[in-house]
Amino acid sequence: MRALLRLAAMLAVGTSAVAADIPIDVMRGQKILADARAACGGPAWDRLTGWHERGRITIAGHPEGSYEEWSAITSLAMAMRTEPGGMPVSHVGTDGTTSWRRLPGGGIDSGAPSGSSRLHVRDAYLSNFAYFMPTRFPAAVVASDPRTVGATVYDVITVRPDRSEDFDLWIDRASHRVARVVVGHQVAELRNYRTVSGVCAPTLAIETDGNPAHTTTLDIDSVDTAPLSAAVFAVPQ
């Protein structure tokens, strides 16, 4: 991460700099990510024009509920509606520039607050699998030291998209699949991969901060990759 902060301004995936000018940790990070993309569909990612998934959500201490998520894929627009059992419904989104959320009373809170806009960009970047489309969505990528958990070795890269907070991807060295997304103390474990429209995607995500009482599980039941209407991401009227 320290290298990323130093190099982010000059190094992005797809840079035109000659290889001799690129530090080793950046070259290694770009190769790790390129290998992961190749193992998970390669150019098929560039042919996707939408991503609409439905599934079940379970928050620790509450009954199972449902969720629905829309990702533009061709831009950083996304929206998500969750109906967790025994908890308030949440409906949030962004059209790529303006973020919004429905308030409990029925109103809409929208805008692009300077303090949190980088977080919105990061979340939309992750929702859209944008790290697999570096030409469309530039990002600085730097490799960290690998990690070993049990018998599994993970290659770790730090990704910082344009105008966004950074995050780490833990990539299983054997399968080249993204196994973890790490943001500070928050960890999302990605499991049960299957192929959808030529790309591989996890169908189970377990999100936690290390406290079992704060665990959220998303089980994907279906995915549709047809193009999505811009109205899905627009600020609700």
Image: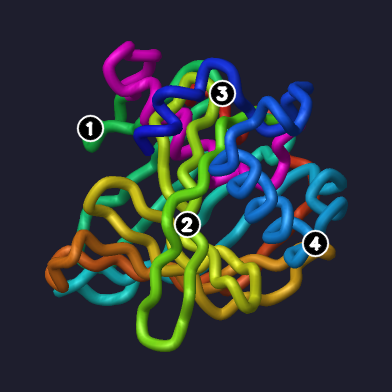
Residue count near mark 1 (Cα–Cα under 10 Å), binned few <14, some 14–19, many ≥20? few
Residue 225 image point, x, y percent: 76, 54
> Could you tell me if the residues under marks 3 and 4 are in contact, i.e. CB atoms within 8 Å?
no
Is residue 76 visible to the viewer in this orientation of the structure? no
Give SS at disc 1. loop
Q: Which residue is mark 2?
A: 156
Q: Which residues are magenta?
A: 108-136
**Which residue type carries mark 3?**
Gly
Name above or below for residue 111 compared with residue 27.
Answer: above
Q: CA distance from mark 4 to mark 1?
A: 43 Å
Residue count near mark 3 (Cα–Cα under 10 Å), binned few <14, some 14–19, many ≥20? some
- Nearer to us: label 2 or label 4: 2
Q: Which residue is mark 3?
A: 96
Q: Earlier in the sequence, mark 1 or mark 3?
A: 3
Q: CA distance from mark 3 to mark 4?
A: 25 Å
Give SS at disc 3. loop
**Which residue type carries mark 4?**
Gly
Give SS at disc 2. strand
Q: Earlier in the sequence, mark 4 or mark 1?
A: 4
Residue count near mark 2 (Cα–Cα under 10 Å), binned few <14, some 14–19, many ≥20? many
Q: Earlier in the sequence, mark 3 or mark 2?
A: 3
